[in-house]
Image (cartoon, rainbow, N blue to C red):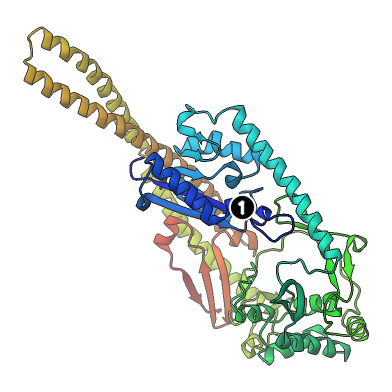
Amino acid sequence: MDNKKTALYIRLSDEDNNVDGIVKAESNSVAAQRILIRDYMQRNGLSNMADTLEYVDDGFSGTNFQRPAFQRMMDDAKQGKIGCIIVKDFSRFGRDHLETGNYLERIFPLLGIRFISVNDQFDSEDCMGMTGGMSVALKNIINSMYSRDLSKKVRSAMGTRAAHGEYMAAFAPYGYMKNPEDAHQLIPDEEAAEVVKMIFTMAAEGKKKPQIARFLNEQGTPTCMEHFQSMGLKRKSPKEKEKKLWTITTIGDMLKNEVYLGKTIWNKTKQAAVGSRRHIKNDRSEWIIMEGTHEPLVSQELFDTANAKAFTHQKKNVPTGRKAQPILICPYCGRRLSPTSWGNAYRCGQAAISGIAECKTIHVDKELLENAILSCTRTMAGMMSAEAGRKKKEWSQTSVIEEKIRVMEAEGKRLSSRKLRLYEDYRSDRLTKEQYLKEYENTVSRILEIEKRIPELKDEVIQIKKQTLQMKEREAELEGLLSLETFDKDKLLTVIESVQVYSEERIEIVWKMDDGFFKEIAGEKEVLALQ
């Protein structure tokens, strides 16, 4: 496998628990899988420890392949760093039989990767290009069925325990912590509990959600996430900003959460599909609600009063779907800018609640700001388009490489014929033994050199053609930007990461740096002032 390394892939997830949610099967532990694979490698002389890479997904389901370590492994594989992947068994690799088969039948052979499943006694190198036929397919189907069946059993068992008042969620809600003596029981977290009580009290007194959020931010009260992290808990939100703030949404969610009444609620949502990370809300009639399972932080009277005064407006019908990515950003709080009520300027959307004085200073003319961004973008698109044209011209020289391949192929055929004639010349005494051996060695050496070089040149041609095709697609985008006259965020986001708006005197455009040729012609930021 030349300089390629052997990858050890190890996976452990909650589905490996017993249905009582307590004991993990020892044979599936990370340590056990590592020992099993290392022992197999040693017995079969596959690789020394320095030539291995280890990828561990601890706590990820096998029903899909959206796992961080697995994705890193595949990125390394596509870059040619990996020549062999070893797993304990097929179920550790994945329980989706269709996708597993796709990797074994198509992706790994295409990448030239050997795949070994120790317990299944499967080695792709022994299968002559096939994955082992029906036996492998059957095992993968069984793994997929097992995962679905186990998921139902685990959820049923957890539902039964929740019906008996046990807290089954992975994390305690803000205001509570898990009892050190019983992980399925909540106890008050004194510091956070006081904040919860204050929020309900302020809402009951008639304070609106923006007022409560602003008060907490001005007081420097740690947000829920900051509080969890200060306790050493590994809590992180995918939408988390660098600058932490209390928001109207956070306040609203807390006021509606019945856990603060001492209730344990289960089955509020369900998985869209086995292994999916997307959840669907269940109707309240399907919820499992147990009262008096832990100490309440607020009374029913305070809860009802706070909710009645906090949610006085009729619920708006918000369109479903993914929210548009913001492009205009407040540099002080990291949130998006919003149009003013008159629609002629932009301001920080969180200025009223952030508690940050600088947020209130942002008030930029809409037309001036948008025109300045459009002008800079068109200029940058022109530079990128010129660079793209230069690259395409450079890459158009593939005919030279293809001609070189044809010459080398012809030379290889000629040398193969020459290799056969050398022995005849030796037998006919036209060559001495020493001459024959020297000529034969030189001929074979050159043939091997050609056989190694031709695939490299062909790969080079393929990569150039791929890059040329991608560049053509990029040129179409750039052409649209060059003629862009309106502030179209979707098109601007193809080259702009964000626009940090400090004031009319200072605007920073942060360019996207994911294009290799883009890095050669642009700085990361461009600072400008509105005229």
Secondary-structure class at tag 1: loop
Q: What kind of residue is marked 1?
A: Gln
Q: Quadrant of the N terminus?
A: top left
Task: Please name the residue that numbered disc 1 is placed on.
Answer: 66
| Residue 198 image point, x, y percent | 79, 90
Left or right of 158? Residue 361 is left
Question: Relative to the observer, which residue lies in front, 20 or 394?
Answer: 20
Residue at 48% x, 44% y is: 86
Q: Is residue 352 visible?
A: no
Toward the top, the furthest residue is 428
In the rendered structure, the answer to whether residue 508 lies left or right of residue 287 reads left
Q: Quadrant of residue 290?
A: bottom right
Image x and y of residue 32, in percent? 53, 53
Whether residue 458 is visible: yes
Q: Quadrant of residue 398?
A: top left
Decide which of 234, 314 is in the foreground and name it: 234
